[in-house]
Amino acid sequence: MDLTNLLKYQELDEKLYDVEQKLTKSPARKRASELSKIAKNAQAKSTELENEAGNILKEIDDIKEKFEQNKKSLESLVSKDLENLSMEDLDKISSLKSKILGNLNYLEKHLQKHAESVNRILMDFNKTKKMYDEARRQFLECKAKIDEETKTLEPEKARLEKELETLSKSVESKLLAEYKKRRSDNIFPVVVPLEGTNFCGRCRMELPMAAISRIKDVGVITCEHCKRLVYKK
Ligand SMILES: [Zn+2]
């Protein structure tokens, strides 16, 4: 079988393949995808921090309320007329007083700890926002670059596709179908020469002798390992 036209087709297709690679795997595209991940993570982190801050603020309100209650109790104890009270009552009041003072002390410490947490959250929040803004700025830069690349490469791609379409008419249809099937699986090059007497020219795996013996009649055989079409030069 004459493979000249198929090989010519592949030669032109290589140019298209290169353009496609440039379009899909450009460094700008890779970076843009990384940056969009960074921005997404920063957003998730911001939401997490907002929730955390909300919970702490609720707890702070709770502590403040308890603080006020204890303060009021203490004030009412202090303002009590102690003149007519028994020794026993005085003892009770005294121990209640120290208990309330203990509560106030405890609440104050808690409040301080929470205030520190709020500060930490604010700091984290600012850091996260900066990270997001920077990722977004760089992302827009990348996007402009990608748009520029696309603008130059798309017409080239369209031109090559048109040329290939014309050239494809000279390739045997069944062979072309086999070729296109592999090409759409992102296998390239699709057609490779036999290496030595029985090795795939691409992946170097040994091909079965039974298949090699058919190569002259059928033109190409499939490498079971890399799925490429192997021909004999
Ligand atoms: Zn192979």
Image: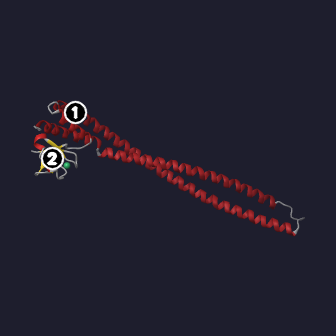
Q: Secondary structure at mark 2?
A: helix
Q: Amino acid at mark 2?
A: Ala
Specify the label residue 211 is tagged with: 2
Given contact means CB atoms under 8 Å apart, are the residues at marks 2 and 1 in contact? no
Q: Secondary structure at mark 1?
A: helix
Of all residues, the one furthest to the right in this rendering is 84
Q: Is residue 19 above or below residue 61?
A: above
**Is 77 on the left-hand or right-hand side of 186?**
right
State which quarter of the image contains the N terminus.
top left
Q: Is mark 2 within 8 Å of ligand 1?
A: no
Q: Amino acid at mark 1?
A: Glu
Disc 1 crowd, CA 10 A, few/some/many (<14, 14-19, 20+) = some
The residue depicted at 19 percent of the width and 34 percent of the height is 174
State which quarter of the image contains the C terminus.
top left
Q: 151 or 184, which lies in front?
A: 184
Residue occupied by mark 1: 161
Displayed quadrant of residue 218: top left
- Could you say where residue 207 lies in the image, as x and y percent from the top left? 16, 50
Q: How many marks?
A: 2
- Colouring convention used in this rendered image of the protein: secondary structure
Disc 2 crowd, CA 10 A, few/some/many (<14, 14-19, 20+) = some
Q: 18 or 202, which lies in front?
A: 202
- Could you say where residue 111 lies in the image, as x and y percent from the top left? 63, 58
Q: Is residue 107 above or below residue 171?
A: below
Q: Earlier in the sequence, mark 2 or mark 1?
A: 1
**Is 103 on the left-hand or right-hand side of 231?**
right
